[in-house]
Image: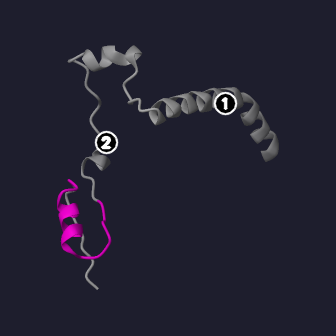
Amino acid sequence: EAIKFLVILHRYFEPTRRSLLQLFQLQQACIDAGGLLDFNPQTSWIREDLTWKAASPAPGLRDCRVEITGPVDCKMVINAFNSGVATYMAKFK
């Protein structure tokens, strides 16, 4: 039954997957040739609309805390302070 489900998914999404893969390969070739990434011109209207705002993050995501583990040396501490997180935990052994 699981194999049948996977076959259905494959048949349904394979054309889209191949199309996206081909688009990715063309874009990668352009980048490899020195081209730069840019925004999709079809979505310029949303970037130019000064009244458009994204929704606020969910309450659980507003205060992001990250544990940075590694040696407690100057470089690691500077990286932690510059990371923008509210809390930094150093691990002294």
What residue is at 32 percent from the left and 73 percent from the top?
70
Q: Position of residue 91 (x, y in %)?
A: 27, 77
* Above or below, 26 relative to 93: above
State whether residue 1 appears in this view: no
Residue 51 against residue 56 in the figure, above or below: above
Whether residue 49 is visible here, answered yes or no, is yes
Q: Is residue 81 left or right of residue 47?
A: left
Categorize mark 1 by other alpha carbons within 10 Å: few (<14), some (14-19), many (20+): few
Query: Residue at label 2?
Result: 58
Out of 70 and 46, give the one closest to the viewer. 70
Q: Residue furthest front?
A: 33
Quarter of the image for the C terminus: give it.
Answer: bottom left
Disc marking residue 59 = none
Find numbered disc 1 in the image and state the secondary structure of the residue it sits on.
helix
Which callout, 2 or 1, points at the residue further toward the start of the chain?
1
Identify residue type, mark 1: Arg
Expressed as whole percent of the image width and height from the top left, the position of residue 28 reads: 51, 34
Over which residues does the magenta segment extend? 66-84
- Residue 48 magenta: no
For disc 1, the marked residue is 18
- Residue 77, percent from left and from top: 19, 68
**Magenta stretch: residue 75 in it?**
yes
Q: Is residue 46 left or right of residue 85?
A: right
